[in-house]
Image (cartoon, helix red, strand yellow):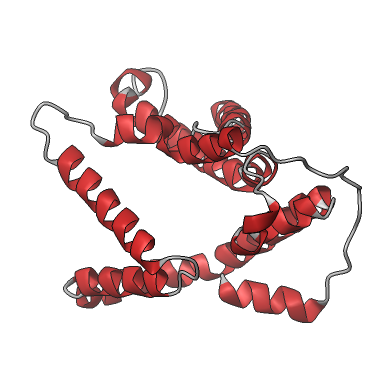
Amino acid sequence: MIEIFLALTAGLVAGTITGLIPGVHVNLIALMLFASSAFFLQYTTPLVLVVFIVSMAITHTFLDFIPSCFLGAPDADTALSILPGHRLLLKGRGYEAVRLTLIGSFAALLLILVIAPLFVLFLPKIYPFFKQYMAFILIAASLFLILKERKSKIWAFILFMLAGCLGIASLNMPLLKQPLFPLLTGLFGASLLVVSITRNVRLPEQKITSAEIKKKEVSKALGAV
């Protein structure tokens, strides 16, 4: 129990770091832990490592919205095509945006705990059927996202193809045994930091406000999850 408690605490600390620092993703820490698992398993058990990863991942989901909201602030011309949190930030309601996302994360966590047993029971039975059509499902989902792009569908398609080329090239490099390690080192935070540096955005004074949330709106949000 002491080892599990220490792993839980360490996961909370690591998740806080990965959530608040752009470019440091939870998958990067998990991959580093997996690469050195042979060393750690000499002193602990797989259960302890799993507790650490799960604790870190959950903590990360609660905190990663903070830098994406405050550091990726857009200018007024692109305010309509960005995250809802950015829109609140430009109105001086950044704290409210963070509060709303924390409420959503907590509600989604409770929902996942409820439906997780159903996934454990039924997913192994239905996955073999969907596995043979998974490529078509992913292509359809990608096309849907590209067609839903409001500003430029062409640029969305180009970026999608470039991402695919990057994945094909990195996964087929014979000398690169762990291609995800360098990819996860900076790509998650690079775009956010570049946008923040290139745009001279002046944020209004942020006020600590609290929005009233109706039960109907919470139900619709959970349904979307």
Q: Residue 130 location in percent, x, y?
A: 24, 75
| Furthest residue in direction left, as rendered | 174
Which residue corresponds to the image point at 77% horizontal and 57% vertical from the top-left? 88
- For the N terminus, the image quarter is top right
In this rendering, would 70 be left or right of 144?
A: right
Q: Is residue 225 above or below residue 190?
A: below
In this rendering, would 215 be left or right of 183?
A: right
Count of all numbered marks drawn on residues in the image: 0
Which residue corresponds to the image point at 61% horizontal and 39% vertical from the top-left? 199
Q: Quadrant of residue 209?
A: bottom right
| Furthest residue in direction bottom, as rendered | 216
Q: Residue 141 location in percent, x, y?
A: 35, 72
Q: Is residue 187 above or below residue 10?
A: below
Q: Is residue 107 above or below residue 64?
A: below
Which residue corresponds to the image point at 29% horizontal and 68% vertical from the top-left? 138
- For the C terminus, the image quarter is bottom right
Which residue corresponds to the image point at 75% horizontal and 77% vertical from the top-left? 217
> Is residue 121 something that shows in the picture?
no
Q: Residue 203 location in percent, x, y?
A: 78, 42
Q: Quadrant of residue 224?
A: bottom right
Q: Quadrant of residue 110?
A: bottom right
Q: Residue 147 location in percent, x, y?
A: 39, 74
Q: Is residue 135 above or below residue 200?
A: below
